[in-house]
Image (cartoon, rainbow, N blue to C red):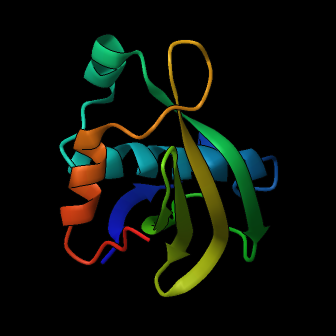
Amino acid sequence: MSHIFALRVYYEDTDFGGIVYHANYLKFIERARSEWVRSLCIDQRRMKAETGTVFAVRWMESDFLKPAVFDDELIVETRLDRLEGASLHLHQTVLRGGDALFDARVRLVCIGPAGRPVRLPASLRAALCHAPGEKPG
């Protein structure tokens, strides 16, 4: 099972040629990750306030497959590949219809108040381990 986030390409997302500017794909998948975490009933503001922990992108590999253009309706599919002590490995794909336009492998790390990796919060681990179809790894 995966999380689906829908979006539309606006003029501001495009370059002079009307094609989505490459850096905006990173914004699209960031929004999708935030909504995925929210769908697991994890409040990131509360997590930071109570424990001082936040998520940071540690590593990313991406592939630009086909261009998206102004007014396209896109979806971002987010899947958990692996869960480790302090990190999550995700696979995110931006699709138009059934066509993959952008593909990314993302490693998120949980960072504590001292700026160092810390174990994932128990509430997040529990939500991921009980989410239908998710692979805790």
Name above or below for residue 116 compared with residue 76.
above
Q: Nearer the viewer, residue 50 or 27?
A: 50
Q: What residue is rendered at 62% in x and 57% in y?
A: 106
Q: What residue is rendered at 56% in x and 41% in y?
A: 109
Image quadrant where residue 60 sits: bottom right
Image quarter (top left, top right, bottom left or bottom right) of the N terminus: bottom left
Do we see residue 69 in this rendering? no
Image quarter (top left, top right, bottom left or bottom right) of the C terminus: bottom left
Name the side, left or right, on which 110 lies relative to 44.
right
Name above or below for residue 6 compared with residue 56.
below
Which percent across, then down, holds residue 43?
25, 31
Name above or below for residue 19 compared with residue 43.
below
The mark tally for this picture is 0
Do we see residue 112 in this rendering? yes
Q: Nearer the viewer, residue 85 or 77?
A: 85
Which percent across, then down, holds residue 21?
75, 50
Q: What residue is rendered at 45% in x and 44% in y?
A: 31
Which percent across, then down, holds residue 13?
63, 45
Q: Nearer the viewer, residue 125 or 34?
A: 125
Which percent across, then down, holds residue 75?
43, 67
Q: Nearer the viewer, residue 43 or 135?
A: 135
Q: What residue is rendered at 72% in x and 50% in y?
A: 59
Name above or below for residue 25 compared with residue 103.
above
